[in-house]
Image: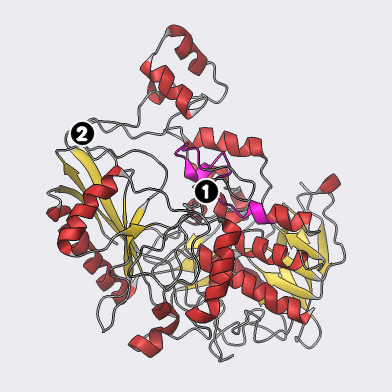
Amino acid sequence: MTAADDRTPTEADVCIVGAGPAGAFTAYSLARRGHDVVVLEAGERLSSEDHHRRMEMWLRPNFERDAFWRNGERDRYTSTGDINARLNETRVKAVGGTSLHWDANTPRLHQEDFEMNTRYGVAQDWPISYDDLQPYYVRAEREMGVSGADDNPHGPPRKEPYPLTAFEPSYSDSLFAEACEELGIAMASQPKAINSEEYDDRSECVGYGVCNACPSGAKYSAEVHVRKAESAGARIVDQVQALSVEHDRTGDYVESVVYATPNGRQYRQEADHFVIACGGIETPRLLLLSDSDVYPDGLANSSGAVGRYLMDHPSVRTTGTLEEPTRQSNIGWVSSRSDQFYAHEETGPGSYHLTFSNTAKSTSGGAQSRLPPTSPSRFLDIVRNPTPDALAELATDPLNEMQLGDALELPTTSGPPYPLSIRGAGEMLPRPDNRVTLDYSKTDNHGRPVPSINLSDGAHAQETMEHCLEIQKSILTELGAEITDVKTLSGRGMSTHHMGTTRMGTDPAESVVNEQCRTHDLANLWIASSSVFTTAGANNPTLTIAALALKTADHIDEEL
């Protein structure tokens, strides 16, 4: 809640819509320079008690993970493509955005991702290069507190070390390493926005193993920079839905954002500059909802590109078993990766990366269920010594609404055989038919048409991930594993990475924003989001989102 629950407009130099990583970084970067910043966020603000409760609920076997964030009519959508959009399983509307439940993987994009047309004759080049973004990558890693090591022979070039040391490889990583070495495949540490040591007034990781609902604060979330922005003078207004963006008579400048409060009242927030930071789905939706006589196809959409070129990261997985222990356990994160197959120097399969699982499910009867402890360590104590008093402690837990017998399932792999798996995620090329539009047959809690998502993989992604599956099979075979399951692209759901729907470019006829992330059509409207990605690359987008937000804030500061 805001102070005194006041959600009325105030004077502002900059109005930002969205309090996820992009909005938080932009707000902090501008507020610390003395600018008056207002951030409008549709979702609620969580307390530390909320985080602890979510951690405990996350551990329960029968809990729906996305039920943390879902809000009935507000979050309605439709999915019309080959790929199920499953939006409310993968996004979060709250202060902090989807970083509240992300895996905290923070690799950079590679050089070739910015030069796809020049190098391979596909897609489009970004109007900026990797070198242009590299200093912002350094800033973003420092701000977030990224743990990593410069040990990736196939990674993008680095000029500065990671701010924190990398986490040690897991035991199963060492098994994979033997097989990869025989095959000439290089493994490297996985960069993580999780503290390997105390950093920025946040504790080191304490190993709860529930990173998607981290209760300790060791994992970065955008709440960190929301708080820093507030300390610098920014105002965060939660639980307000941006309904539309209004421009002046000529359509050259934005004048206000119309938003609704929980009690249904509507206000107009005015500012000198406006930043839309609502992610790859809600950003184009808000622009499409803001049509006018000047922009009949949606605000800032003279190119017709708003909502088009939607991309995500297709992924595949191969699972196998060994007779020897793999020591798979829910440590909460992947600690090793390989970028061996990221760069491709000729036509053929596109880029992908591999990650080596530490959390494979048992195939031999051992349960891998989430648990309901007072604390993880206390729960293990109770299971190891299930005295009547100890069991009564669990039975009287106010959060324990299920049968105790159903809850007492240890996260164990009781083999042999013992499981392990390899996951791969790859690039999807931008295609105009992959898009976000408005579905006028279904409305949200304010009577507005909901987003409709049409997404399919295409031949390039299919070929890329088929090659990835072949490599996964070769590693597990070299390891001597029996392959027990292969997850292909067939019937997959959309990933958590929604990119490309207001893309960056130099030609106003084909793109929505320029190299500064300012819209071509309106002089004071900016977009800070994965929606500005020209291509998707094969790596997690959050670090690039943060880097672009810092860069965009620098350009806005120059205008103020």
Q: Mark 1 points at which residue?
A: 195
Q: Which of marks 2 and 1 is nearer the N terminus?
A: 1
Spot occupied by residue 266 in the image (x, y as percentages of width and height): 81, 60
Q: Mark 2 points at which residue?
A: 364
Is residue 179 magenta-colored?
Answer: no
Amino acid identity at mark 1 = Asn
Spot occupied by residue 131 in the image (x, y as percentages of width and height): 50, 80
Q: Quadrant of the C terminus?
A: bottom right
Q: What element carries label 2?
A: loop
Residue 460 disc label: none
When the figure is inspected, residue 435 is found, relative to residue 520, above or below; the finding is above
Quarter location, residue 536: bottom left
The image shows a total of numbered marks equal to 2
Q: Is mark 1 on a helix, strand or loop?
A: loop
**Where are the magenta residues, as a range?**
205-225
Q: How crowded is mark 1: few (under 14 residues within 10 Å), some or many (20 or more)?
A: many
